[in-house]
Image (cartoon, rainbow, N blue to C red):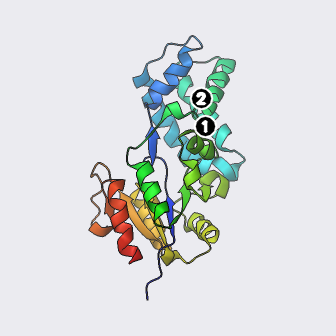
């Protein structure tokens, strides 16, 4: 007999909301306030290179190497702007720390049009909601600023958990908070490996959100695919019946 669905876990970035402007635009806007004129295209290219380096050398915000989310991101910004010719240490520190704190503001994020209705639909169906996100500890402030925090019973960030998706350990922490078995839980996310495969690996009902129809993995059945969160209530109902 199938267990009834009780919880829905959510990824956040690129599932419920997205960064409103490009990294290059954001960084250049902040730098301009301090008298620096940089090229967004150049900054974007530098950021991509630096971000990949940090993600490889200091995975999950360097938690196991003595870093945290803030020091990790400050390092990324400093090194990005250094590649674009900014060399003054005090200036680099100011821009980097300002950006870290400013990213908590709602103006830097865009909530997808279907997000709020999907969360409300889940709650009205009697489901409890939680977050499992590869994000730093600013996530609570961001969700509060965007008007989404009140929908969730708990948040788990990879910085706070000390482990990141696709590790099963972060989902194990979530299941402990849910206080129920994995087959009573669903997870919604946009990343094939980190969200879909990882949640499925621990017995959670994984759903892959593919807003732009870019995921063509043959092992994701149609019933587990979502092109919009508007499709979620009917898919969850199949699990609840």
Q: Residue at x 49, y 50 (%)?
A: 12
Q: Nearer the viewer, residue 67 or 207?
A: 207
Give the number of the disc on residue 99.
Answer: 2
Q: Is residue 84 visible?
A: no
The residue that mark 1 highlights is 73
What is the secondary structure assignment of the residue under circle 1? helix
Residue at the outermost bottom position: 1
Q: Nearer the viewer, residue 101 or 64?
A: 101
Is residue 6 shown above or below 193? Answer: below
Q: Is residue 73 visible?
A: yes
Q: Quadrant of the C terminus?
A: bottom left
Label 2 vs 1, first from the N-terminus: 1
Is residue 62 shown above or below 126? Answer: above
Q: Residue at x 60, y 53 (%)?
A: 157
Q: Position of residue 105 (x, y in %)?
A: 57, 33
Q: Nearer the viewer, residue 35 or 88?
A: 35
Residue at the outermost top position: 35
Q: Nearer the viewer, residue 208 or 158?
A: 208
Instruction: Describe residue 8's horizontal placement relative to residue 71 as left or right.
Output: left
Is residue 61 shown above or below 221? Answer: above
Q: Position of residue 39 (x, y in %)?
A: 43, 19
Residue at the outermost front position: 124
What is the secondary structure assignment of the residue under circle 2? helix
């Amino acid at each position: 007999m199938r267990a009834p669905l009780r919880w829905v876990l959510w990824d956040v970035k690129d599932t419920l909301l997205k960064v409103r402007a490009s990294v290059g635009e954001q960084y250049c806007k902040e730098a301009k306030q301090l008298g620096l004129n940089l090229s967004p295209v150049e900054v974007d290219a530098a950021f991509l290179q630096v971000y990949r380096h940090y993600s490889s050398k200091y995975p999950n915000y360097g938690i196991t190497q003595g870093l945290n989310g803030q020091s990790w991101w400050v390092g990324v910004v400093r090194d990005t702007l250094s590649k674009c010719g900014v060399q003054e240490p005090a200036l680099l520190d100011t821009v980097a720390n300002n950006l870290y704190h400013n990213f908590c503001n709602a103006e830097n994020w865009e909530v997808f049009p279907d997000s709020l209705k999907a969360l409300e639909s889940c709650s009205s169906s009697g489901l409890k909601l939680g977050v499992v996100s590869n994000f730093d500890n600013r996530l609570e402030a961001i969700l509060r600023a965007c008007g989404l925090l009140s929908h969730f019973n708990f948040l788990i960030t990879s910085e706070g958990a000390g482990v990141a998706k696709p590790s099963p350990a972060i989902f194990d922490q979530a299941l402990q908070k849910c206080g129920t078995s994995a087959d009573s839980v669903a997870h919604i996310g946009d990343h094939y490996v980190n969200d879909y495969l990882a949640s499925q690996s621990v017995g959670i009902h994984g759903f892959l959100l593919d807003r732009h129809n870019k995921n063509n993995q043959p092992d994701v059945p149609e019933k587990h695919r979502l092109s919009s969160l508007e499709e979620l209530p009917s898919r969850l109902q199949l699990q609840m019946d």
